[in-house]
Amino acid sequence: MRSVLYLLNNASVGIFGIILSASFCDIAWTRKKYTAVLGGMAVILLMQGAAVGGSDFVKCVYPLITHIPLAALLVALCRKWLWPFVSVFTAYLCCEVRRWLALFTVAVWSGGPVMQDAVELLVTLPLLLIFVWCAAPSVRSISRHSVSGQCLFGLVPALYYGFDYLTNVYKLILNGRLVILEFMPFVCSVTYLFFAVLISKEERMRGSLEQVRDSLGVQVRQAVREIEAMRESQQKTRIYRHDLRHHMQYLLSCLENGRLEQAQNYIQRICLDLETHPVSFYCENEAANLIFSAFAGRFRKHGVKVSIMAKIPREVHVSENDLCVLLSNALENAFHACVGLQEKGIAASVEVTAYEKKQKLFFQFINSCGDDVKMEKGMPAVSRAGGHGIGVRSICAIVRRYGGIYAFDVQAHKFILRISL
């Protein structure tokens, strides 16, 4: 009876550890990968059964016939080198839960080895289900953290693994000494504090990235609203042009009947409507044309000389939202720089060149700037307080998304931005 329970318990703890290690790994599961895990489990159990020399020998070679092959299999399945080892160490730590529950039961009921094997066997499946359903998703999420975060998380399981084998299996460290007994509590305390600091730092970074994302979302929505307003204005202008004959007939009727004041009011009203949002033609691409037209009006309104030479076709490989955010940010930065100079009584100008060649978009923005513009590592040094610098980061992110290149430069009081994507 004892030998049967012992063999069943050894097999169950092997299956428990293998399934748990695999569930802790972030693996895109397919039928082929399920088959690989089942096949690896069978091979590992056969190696355990084939090991000769008694239970003590099996314990000594257990890492060689179980843990190392299992970690190698998980490395091949998830294509990561560090986390599979952390998963194996963590699963080993979880195996101690079933062992402790059995030892607790034996201590309460004054049982023996048979009771311990029986309790370990009974609690294996419930604990496995609890760990897989409740703990595994959270453990897997840590595999997406930085390498330092993964190392801190795996430090306790790894040290416990080595500590347990050195003290209980290989007998290389004398038990009973206070410094030895207090080693793992010390490790747990220090690691917990470091892990808390790291998690806090990553949460702050995540919060900063979320703020940038929200700011970029506002820019996208604002650009979309401006485009819609310009489209409505453009459509209204087209309608007026289409109805020009009817307007002329109405004015002719007013003049023939001597209603000069009524004709004048009608002409003024039409002119006011047409001049509310004037749309100029710069290129065939509607979104780019509307952005150029809107900013050209803003530049001229503040007395900034603007020149736009654009040859962008109707269809481009860049999405309309990305194109609008890219142009809006570049022109918005140029606008603020030029208006700042105008307020100081310094003449400012903007030159924009845009064209497509061999399915690549090229942009060049040249605007006047002051002496306060500094460059750091090829990037304009801007304050990140109050949302400053988000436009530059947004431009860089969009260019990188399309595998393009960008270059910032300052020459003779001119700020130059070149983009190819």
Image: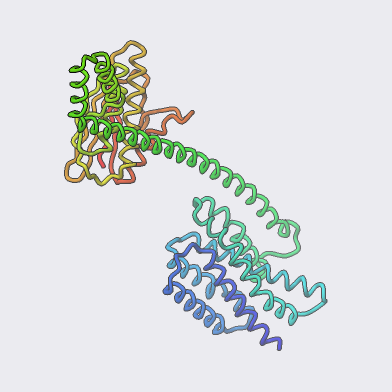
Question: Residue 272's spot in the image, x, y percent?
Answer: 29, 21
Q: Is residue 301 above or below residue 141?
A: above
Q: Residue at x 20, y 33 (%)?
A: 242
Q: Quadrant of residue 297?
A: top left
Question: Residue 367's spot in the image, x, y percent?
Answer: 28, 23
Mark yes or no: residue 413 visible: no
Q: Which residue occupies the extreme front position in the image?
A: 257
Question: Residue 416's spot in the image, x, y percent?
Answer: 27, 28
Foreground residue among 224 and 133: 224
Q: Is residue 191 above or below residue 45?
A: above
Mark yes or no: residue 89 visible: yes
Left or right: where 161 falls relative to 396: right
Q: Is residue 141 above or below residue 116?
A: above
Image quadrant for the C terminus? Answer: top left
Q: Which residue is drawn at 29% across and 16% down?
A: 303
Q: In this view, does 52 lie above or below 60?
A: below
Foreground residue among 144 and 5: 144
Q: Residue at x 29, y 21 (%)?
A: 269
Image quadrant for the N terminus? Answer: bottom right
